[in-house]
Amino acid sequence: MIQVKRLILFVLLTIFVFMLSVPAAISVTFKINVTHDLDNPFGRIFSLSYDNITDGVYFGGEGGIFGYYNRNLNQTLDLSQTDAGDFIPNTFINAIGFDSKNNGAYLFGFNIFSYYNKTSNVTEDLRGTIASGVLVEPIGIASFFGASYDFNNDGVYMGGSQGTFGYYNRT
């Protein structure tokens, strides 16, 4: 028992002496994965899309929730009133595709197909660009649930209910 105590004491002293001999310029950094509560005052969020240009996140959800979280400023902006035709407030935004070429965002949801222009701070309704009978369900324009921006061709893929799949070419 005494030998075990001596061995433990020897190990501890060795570690202490080693730590004293380590140069002060050496530092140890620990990476800790932590989920932060960003204090969402808006409600249920269904869609997120990262903005790699300004290091922020677009979000959309129930009841026309549409906003932008600026990570650098730790500030959340409500963008739901940026639509001139007031078509956002009473819908669900289920998918957002960040347009990294033009620094904007495509919004998709129930009866929603629009584009947010960050420069002008205006969301334009793109539902009129859908050809008659294309991407339309018996209840109107499709309910979209997925979006992916195509940087190389400057367009966006969209997918939704009842097998809806399409492509919008911006140019």
Image: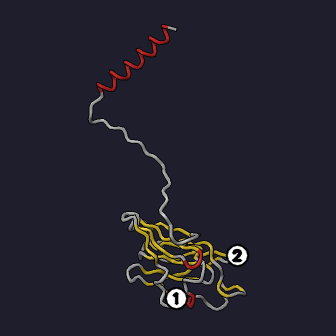
Q: Position of residue 100 (x, y in %)?
A: 43, 71
Q: Position of residue 115 (x, y in %)?
A: 49, 81
Asked if residue 111 can be seen in this view, the reply is yes
Q: Which residue is mark 1?
A: 86
Above-or-below relation of 105 to 139: above
- Tell me which amino acid carries mark 2: Gly
Amino acid at circle 1 = Asp
Residue most extreme to the top: 2
Give the residue at x 65% y 79%.
Answer: 143
Asked whether the viewer can see residue 171, the reply is no
Identify which residue, 133 or 70, lies in the foreground: 70
Residue 43 in percent (x, y) is at 56, 71
Mark toward the start of the polypeptide (1 vs 2): 1
Query: Which of the 4 image quarters holds residue 15?
Result: top left
**x 67%, y 88%: residue:** 140
**Which residue is label 2 attached to?**
163
Label 1 element class: loop
Disc 2 element:
helix
Q: Depth check: 153 or 62 in front?
A: 62
- Note whether 69 is above or below 2 in the view shown: below
Residue at x 47% of width, y 12% of height: 5
